[in-house]
Image (spheres, rainbow, N blue to C red):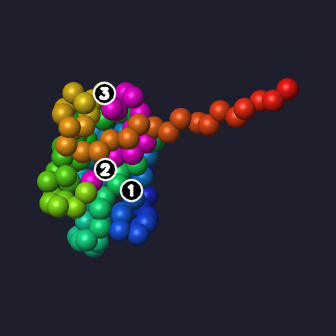
Amino acid sequence: MTIVHTIQGNRILVAIHGDLDLTTAAPLREALDELLDRYREKALVLDLSEVEFIDSSGLGVILGRYRRMGNRPLSLIGVKPSVKAVLELAGITAIISVTDAFKPAVKDQHV
C-alpha cells in the first residue's frame, strides 16, 4: 500500500493505493493519525480510487478516524462499486460522505 497526501486549502487529501486489510490497517492508521495531529484544523478527504478491496480492518481505520475527527469533516472520494458495497453494508455511507469513482469522459464524435 502507498499513501500520498497533499494539503489543499483547509483539507488534507490522502490518496491510498492498494488494499485496505489486516496487513495495511496499522500503517494507514499511524499515517492518518500523524496527519490529523499535524493539521488539527483541516478536514480529511480519503481518495480510494486505487483501492480494490477493503475488509473489517480497513473499515475500522475509517471509522476510528471519523470518531477522531470530532467536528471536522471526513469524506471518501473515488470509491469503486465493490468498495462502496462494503461501506454500505457496514453503514458507513450513512455517516460519512462517499462519492463514487469518477467515470472517464466520453468525447463526442462528429462526422
Instruction: Give the residue number, with chain letter if any, for mark 1.
Output: 14
Q: Is residue 85 above or below residue 13?
A: above
Point out the frontmost of discs 2 and 3: 2
**Of callouts 1 and 2, which one flags the residue occurring earlier in the amino acid sequence?**
1
Is residue 47 shown left or right of residue 69? right
Range of residues picked out in magenta: 74-84
Instruction: Give the residue number, with chain letter if any, for mark 3.
Output: 85
Which residue occupies 32% across, 41% down? 98
Mark carried by residue 47: none
Give residue 6's position: percent from left, percent from top: 43, 64
Mark carried by residue 75: 2
Which residue occupies 35% across, 54% down? 45
Q: Residues within 10 Å of mark 3 (few under 14, many from 20)?
A: few
Give residue 47's position: percent from left, percent from top: 40, 49
Give residue 68's position: percent from left, percent from top: 15, 58
Which residue occupies 43% across, 66% down? 8
Task: Determine whether the residue tagged by mark 1 lies in a helix, strand or loop.
Answer: strand
Which residue occupies 39% across, 29% down? 81
* Residue 91 falls in image quadrant: top left
For the residues labelled 2 and 3, the Cα–Cα distance comes to 16 Å
Hey, what amino acid is under mark 1?
Val
